[in-house]
Image: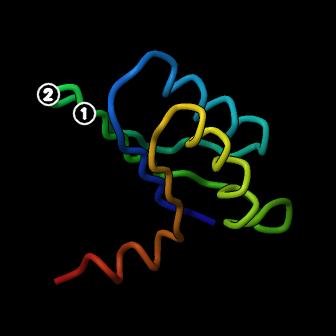
């Protein structure tokens, strides 16, 4: 399954390391990533792939919630199909 993850908040050291380490623990593969800094504000969008039989979107979000709290970021994940449907014109 493919999903889109967004990470946003004030920039600080260790955001990328914390997020990618948590994803690696769940065997979630990062297929594509874009990140930017603007006036001290960090934004990262990841396209990820994982085996639905091994883990779920909820399990990934549950694992990333402590990371979000620790890094003071808003981290959200949703299926790529839902993300695409919500963002099509």
Q: In the picture provided, is 11 more to the left or to the right than 70?
A: left
For this orientation, the residue located farthest to the top is 13
Relative to residue 23, is residue 74 depicted above or below?
below
Q: Residue at x 49, y 27 (%)?
A: 15
Relative to residue 74, is residue 83 depicted above or below?
below
Image location (x, y in percent) of residue 84: 35, 75
Who is closer to the viewer here, 12 or 29?
A: 12
Image location (x, y in percent) of residue 41: 25, 33
Contact between marks 1 and 2 (CB within 8 A): the answer is: yes
Q: Which mark is residue 25?
A: none
Quadrant into which the N terminus falls: bottom right
Q: Residue at x 78, y 37 (%)?
A: 25
Indicate how the structure is coloured in the image: rainbow
Secondary structure beneath dot 2 equals loop
Secondary structure beneath dot 1 equals strand
Image location (x, y in percent) of residue 54: 85, 60
| Disc 2 packing (10 Å; few <14; some 14–19; many ≥20) | few
Q: Which mark is residue 39?
A: 2
Quadrant location of residue 30? Answer: top right
Relative to residue 67, is residue 5 depicted above or below?
below
Quadrant into which the C terminus falls: bottom left
For this orientation, the residue located farthest to the right is 54
Residue under numbered circle 1: 41
Q: Residue at x 80, y 61 (%)?
A: 55
Q: In the picture provided, is 42 more to the left or to the right than 57?
A: left
Q: Residue at x 16, y 31 (%)?
A: 38
Relative to residue 75, is residue 11 depicted above or below?
above
Image location (x, y in percent) of residue 20: 60, 32
Quadrant location of residue 34? Answer: top left
Cα–Cα span, label 1 and label 2: 6 Å
């Amino acid at each position: 399954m493919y999903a889109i993850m967004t990470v946003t908040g004030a920039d600080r050291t260790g955001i990328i390391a914390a997020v990618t380490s948590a994803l690696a623990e769940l065997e979630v593969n990062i297929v594509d990533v874009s990140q930017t800094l603007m006036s001290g504000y960090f934004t990262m969008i990841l396209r990820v792939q994982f085996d639905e039989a091994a883990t779920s979107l909820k399990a990934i979000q549950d694992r990333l919630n402590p990371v979000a709290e620790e890094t003071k970021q808003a981290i959200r994940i949703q299926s790529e199909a839902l993300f695409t449907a919500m963002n099509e014109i």
